[in-house]
Image (tube, rainbow, N blue to C red):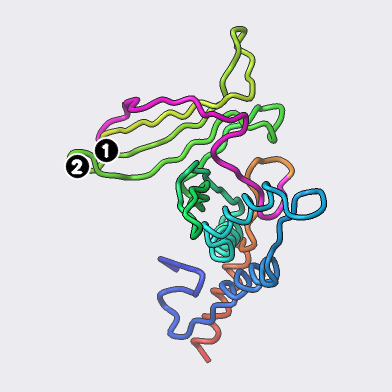
Amino acid sequence: HHNRHHAGSMYDNITINFVGLVVDRAVTMLFGNGVEFDMPGEGETPQDELIRGTWDANKQEILLHKIATLGAESGTCFVKLLPDGIRGRDGNLYVRLVALDPKMCEIETLPSDIEYVMKYIIKWKDKKDGKEVRRKQEIKRGADEAGISNDTWLIEDYWQKTNSNQWNLERSEVWAYDFPPVMHWQNLPSPLSPYGQADITEDVIVLQDRLNFVASNM
């Protein structure tokens, strides 16, 4: 089968997309009843107001649905933080939360500790001076004078011509916080990799293709 996708192959005249249904059901079970965030302590705190304002500005239910769907399909969820990147209905600026396409993202960890992230790499295609280029952003840990990594983070933006292997540094900035501007987590746990497991695996897709083949023959 060529050009196979989750709904079946190009040769099937009947496609039954149970694979997509699995993802939809999983996401609904996860977030269908909504999610609430509450800081410790009694009553409304400034932190509670900030969290509520941030989620409201980022359209919480839609955003969580996007993140969960991407995670179910790829195995790993990625979210980028953009300080003062979105204005809420109250007129205040909040952190913008961006669901990243997992196919754009790479994780580098310590060889001895897959939970200790050393670098996030985000790659995509773009235009520069009217010509197509490749871009990447590296978000990597800083290090002290002895070269030992710490909780500072450096953001570096690069671009590259499509016919070249040379990356050109365009911008470098020290992130102002002791956590990185990208978060990731596993959709389903994988003990030997920073990447998680998807809800949809190759054996399930093969089963879906066989079902569509039988349905088409019938």
Say left or right for 35 vs 136. Answer: right
- Residue appearing at x 50%, y 41% in the figure: 83
Tag 2: residue type? Lys
Hey, which quadrant is residue 27 in on the image? bottom right
Q: In this rendering, is residue 157 above or below 58? A: above
> Are the two marked residues, 2 and 1, in contact with CB atoms closer than 8 angstroms?
yes
User: What residue occupies the far left of the structure in this picture?
Assistant: 130
Q: What element carries label 1?
A: loop
Q: Distance between the residues labelled 2 and 1?
A: 9 Å
User: What residue occupies the far top of the structure in this picture?
Assistant: 146
Where is mark 1, residue-wise?
Answer: 162
- Residue appearing at x 23%, y 39% in the figure: 128
- Residue appearing at x 32%, y 33% in the figure: 159
Residue bounds of the magenta highlight: 162-190
* Of the image marks 2 and 1, the number of the one nearer the N terminus: 2
Tag 1: residue type? Thr
